[in-house]
Image: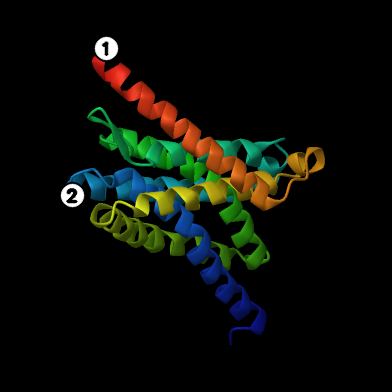
């Protein structure tokens, strides 16, 4: 007979995976949206396996990682850059946005997964409350959520390009949460989440404009 606490933990893990894996799925979907069908599926598979591998590693090293100063804040800043990188647009015929090669997509996905997986692991580990079976279930549940979610998101982005802005804002929001929840940053500044979100939006659009300005220059050289 499954205990009430186990059922509650199971329900919590399902909800956490649905919510937190959504950020990863958005990143993967935006990164692969311009790849052809076969390469897109391969990049999604590699990105998903990379995300799961990072989560297993972070689960083992969770206590050690939490002791690293400003790790979450650095991850949040990295997400601002990734959002700017993935935000679509064209300048003088030079494409700025989704990855145009398999390994470029995989690199963006792995970097984003590195930053997003820490909070996911900590949340799932807390809901599992030391139950190894529930923790394992949470990790494996992430696989279909990421693969199916990112494939669907890539299709939607190709059909409605304006959704790229929505995806970029979601990534910035995830980055703002990481910075706001970093204990070292909170001690120094203590800004509310919305303030970091505003900073992230300014950083994303500023970096995106810089990338668009540099794209024709690099193409001409």
- In the current view of this chain or complex, which residue is farthest to the right? 187
Evaluate whether residue 86 shows in this view.
yes
Could you give the CA–CA distance between mark 1 and mark 2, rounded to whole angstroms? 31 Å
Q: Upstream in the sequence, badge 1 or badge 2? A: 2
| Residue under the point 68% across and 66% down | 129
> Pointer 1: residues within 10 angstroms few (<14), some, or many (20+)?
few
* Residue named by callout 2: 37
The kind of secondary structure element at disc 2 is helix
Q: What residue do we see at 22% from left, 29% from top?
A: 93
State which quadrant residue 126 falls in: bottom right
Residue denoted by label 1: 221
Q: Quadrant of the C terminus?
A: top left
Whether residue 114 sits left or right of residue 191 in the image: it is: left
Which labelled disc corresponds to residue 82? Answer: none
Q: Residue 127, how many percent across, how many down?
A: 64, 67
Residue 167, placed above or below residue 70: below
Please state which of residues 201 and 66 is positioned toward the viewer in this rendering: 201
């Amino acid at each position: 007979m499954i205990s009430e606490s186990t059922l509650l933990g199971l329900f919590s893990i399902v909800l956490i995976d649905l919510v937190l894996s959504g950020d990863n799925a958005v990143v993967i979907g935006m990164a692969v949206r311009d790849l052809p069908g076969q390469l897109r599926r391969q990049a999604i598979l590699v990105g998903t396996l990379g995300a799961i591998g990072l989560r297993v590693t972070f689960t083992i090293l969770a206590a050690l990682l939490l002791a690293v100063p400003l790790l979450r804040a650095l991850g949040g800043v990295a997400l601002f850059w990734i959002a700017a990188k993935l935000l679509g647009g064209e300048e003088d015929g030079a494409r700025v946005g989704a990855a145009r090669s398999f390994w470029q997509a995989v690199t963006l996905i792995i970097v984003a997964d590195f930053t997003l997986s820490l909070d996911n692991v900590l949340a799932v580990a807390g809901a599992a409350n030391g139950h190894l079976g529930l923790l394992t279930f949470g990790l494996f549940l992430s696989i279909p959520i990421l693969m199916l979610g990112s494939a669907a998101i890539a299709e939607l982005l190709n059909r409605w390009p304006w959704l790229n802005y929505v995806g970029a804002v979601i990534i910035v929001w995830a980055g703002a949460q990481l910075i706001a929840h970093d204990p070292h940053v909170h001690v120094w500044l203590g800004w509310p989440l919305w303030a970091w979100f505003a900073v992230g939006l300014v950083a994303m659009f500023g970096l995106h404009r810089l990338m668009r300005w540099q794209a024709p220059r690099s193409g001409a050289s």
